[in-house]
Amino acid sequence: MTRETDTTPAPEQAPGRRDFLGMVTTAGTVTGMAACAIPFVESLQPQDSAAAHLPVDVDISRLAPGQQMVAVWQGKPVFIIRRTPEELASLQNASLTAQLKDADSSANQQPGYARNWHRSVAPEYGVYVGICTHLGCVPSYTPPQGSGPEASGGYGCPCHGSKFDLAGRVQKGAPAPYNLPVPPYSMPSATVIRLGENPKGETFDFSTIEQI
């Protein structure tokens, strides 16, 4: 017995159905993208567990001179920058320091062991909580371009224009009242920065800073 085959063309989907399927597909894609973003956003939120207050080790072995990386400590972005010899020299330039509100880090915005011209444990590495002391925006990093104090690089707040140098020191005339905070940290090895733990023999409570 021969089976007859129905060769009648299938009816085209109505425009309304095609539009609906397209909307479902688009919604699924957007939902997937949002789902990928949620873990990152949540990682920046303060956590209530005791684990949130434990030290965080950051591997800096691949951080090249002149580059910056961002870590997360207690829900806060932390900028870690490896400064070149030229960049370190610029931090001591008299014409640059004359433009700063607190060039000597007299305000309590850093541990005592970072109250120096480079505001860090080791001059080569700068470590700052990346939150502007004006209204809590996250400044963007600009590498040095050219030569001279005006091209020395640093951080700029995209919201209200506050500028900070490569030691996190705020410029005069900026709305931000204080330098970027330096968190408690240590360097257990040449390639690891441990956020949230002071060097041996040192004490610093981050909650005592002037402002964040």
Image: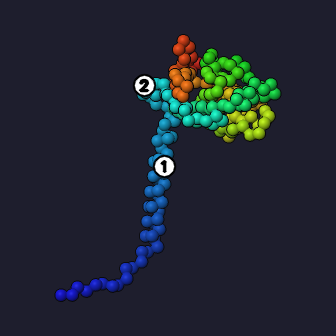
Q: Nearer the viewer, residue 64 or 19?
A: 64
For marks 1 and 2 on the same chain, the one whose residue lies earlier in the sequence: 1
**Location of residue 121 in the rendering, given as x and y in whole percent from the top left corner:** 61, 21
For badge 1, the amino acid type reads Ala
Q: In terms of secondary structure, where does tag 1 sit?
A: helix
Question: Residue pushed farthest top?
Answer: 201
Q: Is residue 210 visible to the viewer in this orientation of the structure? A: no
Q: Is residue 156 left or right of residue 74?
A: right
Q: Secondary structure at mark 2?
A: helix
Cα–Cα gap, marks 1 and 2: 28 Å
Split into 4 quadrants, where in the image is the N terminus? bottom left
Instruction: Tell me the kind of residue under disc 2.
Output: Ala
> Looking at this view, is 87 or 42 the one in front?
87
Q: Position of residue 144 (x, y in %)?
A: 72, 37
State the residue lying farthest toward the left: 1
Task: List x then y, in percent, for residue 163.
Answer: 72, 34
Image quadrant in which you'd find residue 6: bottom left
Binning the other alpha carbons within 10 Å of mark 2 as few (below 14), some (14 to 19) or many (20 upward) gives few
At a point 77% along the width and 31% down the height, the residue shown is: 173
- Does the image show residue 46? yes
Q: Residue at x 43, y 25 (%)?
A: 50
Labels in figure, total: 2
Name the mark on residue 34.
1
Disc 1 residue crowd, few under 14, some 14–19, many 20+, Cα 10 Å: few
Relative placement, left or right, of 23 versus 109 is left
Q: Mark 2 — residue?
A: 50
At 57% from the left and 31% from the top, the residue drawn is 78
Considering only vertical position in the picture, is 194 above or below 2? Answer: above
Please, which residue is most extreme toward the right here?
95
79 or 25: nearer the eye?
79
Q: Nearer the viewer, residue 5 or 189?
A: 189
